[in-house]
Image: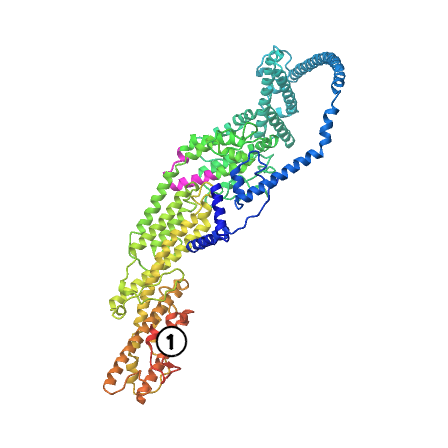
């Protein structure tokens, strides 16, 4: 460090202006460019001079670092730094002396003031020990008093707890005695069996007259259940205190519970029978309302006791199983089903509970039938779900639905009302363990109705319902069964009940019994077999195909067969929602098969038959034709003409069918397919881009359509260019004419040039091959044909120009001037011929433009026609020759 400072000092003394350093930096800047310039700029930053003070971070640090201090003063030389340090030292000494001088008197008097303080401190300290002893004694006496009070409080709290426990035991005893009295259990030795039931309940299930004798038995049992729940609560508190009394009375508690549940079961069974028995026709409305009230009270008691499954089991055995045994058996579909007439006192109407969400299954046009009849003005009957089916299975389902609607719906509605599900758990996936709707609450639809009927159908009718040997019958059975399931969901009291039914093991097993893969294979063979028979012919024949409904929009039976097969995949008589992925794949395969058949069946044209290069403009995504050799248009035999007619007919037929196919398939997608495919989820993107896949498949047919449109334009261009051949004989014809009057009409062949386009699209002529393609293809073909004609016209005029130039040079060598393009020095007759030829050309080109404009708007604006007009007007304007200018058509053609 010292050597560095020494070197800096020596350099500073020898070169005070640092010229050498500036020269070196200038040279480095020229070598390194901008970087050197930036470094030079940074090198001339002048440091800020900060004098040494107490605030300097290096001087006030706990550990003085010499290197950091010197680096902070890098622009200060060592002598200057030494001088600064000496100045700072002197200032420190002056401050220290000033500090001592300011407080000198206090330093001197400090020792004098402390004399004699020791004895005074001893006198103060003497009484403190005595005071401490007295405080300790008082603290001990207070602690003894506190301990005695706390002991008394603890004993009193213990006595209070024992008193509360005794009161609790007394409540348990009184509650138990009250329950035994309410249940007519007079003695602890009374046997615990149903024979001890009250006399008025002994025959409660025998006849409907018991409804009158029961009185308010339901409310009585509700009171007993409330008392029993309080007893259980008190017993749980006593059991927490480990009271032996609880174990001693457990037998009596069990007897009370058994008696209560037995009475409740008998009353509930009798009430169900009084409501659901069909032979009780004499029960009046008031008595029936009393029975409904008893039913409500019973269900409320079951809900309070938490015996939901027990109540559902009684409903299963008392009502559902008896109906299932009488209705669903092996030969039930072979015998006529008598109609179920609703009982007279209570009409069969459906009541939708407040807040219920029905129906729960989204409707699609192939998996459901909307209700068409209703038993009330507001709510449709569930039997209308099966109105569109007329078969024994549908009639059986209707009978089951009428039974549920008539006898069980009211029970489900009451159960849903008396047992609100606060902590109901909806099962998210079928793989979860089935627990109904949780452990608290009734779920009659999911736990009683569906398991009984679903299991009975699988056991008794499974060989008939799920057999897929006959596809037509299978799809009808599947559709009617799905409509039956939707009707059950319509009757479900809540959304949670519907989801619980769908997650029930019987429901999952029921859905797995359908032999859907077998059914799809049968339909696949049927559809694909018909399509392959239709596509076996690889010859495209023009004409109108016929469909089952009459005349078809397609011109070939193959296209009609493809669309019919695609439509049938999504028809109500074939489509099944669970098979939507397979039918979607089959739809795409049918479109791909049609494209393959077109590739095989379409004829190929000769490469030499293509017209000259058209204007390179993109029109509706169709490719432009390539250039062809001029001589390919001239020599066309009659056989080639017939071949071209056949090709045009086939191309037009296929173009019409492809356009119709695109429209019909997209219409089918909007109306049927998009609604039938399942909606994509966050984790499933199989169907997220279904429409994109369909449009991509149709775009492959669009590529075939583009190629065919190009071929049609090629053939029509060839014919139009053939009609342009007489333009080469215009000069010889006009020179040979005896009359030298100026022409006033275009040549006869001009109107024939674009006639092939008009004839193809049926413009002015009936039954054109491409009449149905006029809107989609006319502009493209007309532009291409007219562009090719204009380029061929330019080629002819260029060839004629070269011929005239050769003749002019030849005549000039013979000292004779003749020709159609002579200058102003030519003879008068030859000038007149040149003028007539130019006028005829102007008339022909103008007539050609007007003809093209009448065919399609904007044709006169294409580049090749502008070049043709410019080429003709270069020497002739308004029908008169410009003598001061020489003919120069070559630049226009280029």
Q: Name the residue at 39% across, 62% down.
A: 618
| Camera-side residue of 530 and 380 | 530
Q: Residue furthest top?
A: 189
Rendered location of residue 536, percent (x, y): 29, 51
Q: Is residue 152 magenta?
A: no
- Dominant secondary structure of the residues highlighted in magenta in the image: helix
Rendered location of residue 796, percent (x, y): 30, 74
Taking 240 as reference, is 122 left or right?
Answer: right
Rendered location of residue 738, percent (x, y): 29, 87
Q: Give residue 56's quadrant in the image.
A: top right
Taking 321 as reference, is 263 left or right?
Answer: right
Q: Give residue 174's quadrant in the image.
A: top right
Q: Is residue 767 visible?
A: no
| Camera-side residue of 744 and 326 | 744
Q: Which residues are magenta?
A: 463-482
Q: Is residue 467 magenta?
A: yes
Q: Give residue 284's quadrant in the image.
A: top right
| Camera-side residue of 58 and 418 | 58
Q: Name the residue at 28% across, 77% down.
A: 802
Instruction: Look at the image and name its color scheme.
Output: rainbow
Q: Is residue 315 visible?
A: yes
Task: Find disc 1 in the rendering and name its residue.
Answer: 870
| Camera-side residue of 602 and 797 | 797
Taking 316 as reference, is 824 left or right?
Answer: left
* Quadrant containing the C terminus in the rendered view: bottom left
Q: Name the residue at 76% across, 16% down.
A: 123
Disc 1 is placed on an element classified as: helix
Q: Residue furthest left?
A: 814
């Amino acid at each position: 460090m010292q050597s560095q400072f020494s070197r800096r000092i020596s350099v500073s003394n020898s070169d005070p202006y640092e010229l050498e350093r500036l020269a070196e930096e200038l040279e480095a800047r020229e070598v390194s460019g901008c970087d050197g310039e930036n470094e030079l700029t940074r090198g001339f930053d002048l440091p800020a001079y900060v004098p040494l003070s107490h605030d300097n971070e290096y001087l006030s640090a706990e550990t003085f670092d010499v290197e950091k201090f010197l680096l902070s003063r890098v622009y200060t030389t060592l002598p200057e730094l030494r001088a600064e340090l000496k100045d700072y030292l002197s200032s420190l000494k002056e401050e220290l002396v000033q500090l001592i001088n300011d407080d000198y008197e206090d330093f001197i008097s400090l020792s004098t003031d402390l004399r004699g303080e020791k004895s005074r401190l001893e006198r103060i300290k003497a009484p403190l020990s005595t005071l401490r002893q007295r405080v300790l004694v008082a603290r001990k006496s207070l602690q003894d008093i506190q301990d005695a009070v706390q002991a008394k409080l603890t004993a009193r709290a213990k006595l209070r707890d024992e008193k509360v426990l005794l009161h609790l035991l007394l409540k348990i005893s009184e509650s138990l005695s009250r329950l035994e009295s309410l249940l007519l259990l007079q003695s602890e030795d009374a046997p615990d069996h149903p024979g001890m039931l009250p006399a008025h309940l002994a025959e409660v299930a025998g006849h409907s007259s018991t409804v009158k004798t029961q009185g308010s038995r339901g409310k009585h049992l509700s009171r007993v259940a409330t008392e029993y729940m309080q007893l259980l609560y008190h017993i749980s508190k006593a059991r927490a205190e480990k009271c032996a009394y609880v174990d001693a009375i457990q037998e009596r508690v069990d007897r009370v519970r058994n008696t209560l549940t037995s009475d409740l079961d008998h009353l509930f069974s009798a009430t169900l029978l009084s409501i659901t028995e069909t032979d009780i026709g004499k029960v009046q409305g008031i008595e029936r309302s009393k029975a409904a009230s008893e039913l409500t009270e019973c269900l409320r008691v079951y809900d309070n006791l938490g015996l939901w499954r027990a109540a559902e089991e009684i409903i299963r055995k008392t009502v559902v199983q008896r109906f299932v045994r009488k209705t669903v058996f092996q030969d039930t579909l072979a015998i006529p089903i008598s109609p179920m007439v609703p009982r007279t006192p209570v009409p069969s109407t459906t009541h939708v509970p407040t807040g219920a969400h029905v129906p729960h299954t989204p409707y699609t046009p192939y998996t459901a039938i909307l209700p068409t009849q209703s038993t009330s003005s507001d709510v449709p009957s569930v039997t209308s779900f099966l109105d569109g089916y007329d078969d024994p299975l549908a009639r059986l389902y209707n009978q089951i639905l009428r039974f549920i609607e008539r006898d069980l719906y009211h029970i489900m509605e009451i159960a849903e009302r008396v047992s609100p599900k606060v902590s109901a758990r909806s099962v998210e996936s079928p793989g979860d363990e089935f627990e109904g709707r949780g452990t608290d609450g009734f779920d009659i639809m999911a736990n009683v109705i569906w398991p009984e009927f679903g299991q009975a159908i699988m056991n008794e009718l499974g060989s008939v319902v799920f057999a897929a040997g006959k596809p037509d019958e299978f799809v009808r059975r599947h559709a009617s069964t799905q409509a039956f399931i939707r009707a059950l969901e319509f009757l479900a009291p809540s959304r949670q009940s519907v989801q619980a039914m769908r997650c029930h093991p019987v429901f999952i097993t029921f859905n797995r019994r359908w032999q859907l893969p077998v059914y799809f294979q049968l339909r696949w063979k049927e559809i694909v077999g018909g399509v392959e028979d239709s596509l076996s012919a690889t010859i495209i024949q023009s004409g109108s195909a016929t469909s089952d409904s009459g005349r078809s929009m397609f011109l070939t039976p193959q296209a009609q067969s493809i669309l019919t097969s695609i439509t049938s995949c999504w028809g109500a008589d074939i489509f099944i929602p669970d098979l939507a992925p397979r039918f979607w794949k089959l739809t795409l395969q049918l479109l791909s098969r049609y494209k393959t058949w077109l590739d095989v069946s379409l004829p190929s044209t000769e490469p030499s038959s293509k017209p000259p290069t058209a204007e390179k403009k993109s029109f509706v995504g169709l490719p432009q034709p390539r250039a062809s050799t001029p001589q390919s248009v001239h020599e066309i035999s009659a056989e080639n003409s017939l071949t071209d007619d056949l090709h045009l007919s086939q191309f037009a037929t296929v173009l019409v069918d492809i356009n119709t196919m695109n429209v019909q398939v997209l219409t089918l997608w909007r109306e049927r397919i998009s609604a039938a495919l399942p909606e994509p989820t966050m984790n499933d993107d199989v169907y997220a881009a279904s429409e994109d896949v369909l449009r991509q498949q149709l775009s492959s047919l669009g590529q075939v359509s583009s190629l065919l449109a190009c071929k049609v334009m090629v053939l029509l261009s060839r014919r139009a260019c053939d009609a342009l051949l007489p333009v080469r004989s215009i000069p010889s014809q006009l020179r040979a004419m005896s009359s030298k009057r100026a022409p006033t009409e275009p040549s006869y062949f001009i109107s024939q040039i674009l006639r092939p386009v008009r004839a193809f699209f049926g413009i002015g002529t009936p039954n054109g091959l491409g009449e149905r393609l006029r809107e989609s293809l006319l502009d493209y073909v007309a532009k291409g044909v007219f562009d090719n004609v204009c380029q061929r016209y330019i080629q002819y005029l260029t060839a004629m120009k070269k011929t005239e130039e050769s003749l002019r040079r030849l005549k000039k060598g013979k000292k004779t001037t003749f020709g159609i393009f002579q200058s102003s020095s030519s003879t008068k007759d030859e000038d007149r011929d040149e003028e007539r030829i130019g006028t005829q050309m102007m008339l022909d080109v103008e007539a050609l433009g007007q003809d093209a404009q009448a065919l399609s708007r904007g044709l006169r604006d294409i580049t090749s026609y502008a070049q043709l007009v410019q080429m003709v007007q270069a020497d002739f304007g308004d029908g008169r020759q410009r003598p001061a200018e020489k003919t120069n058509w070559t630049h226009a053609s280029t």
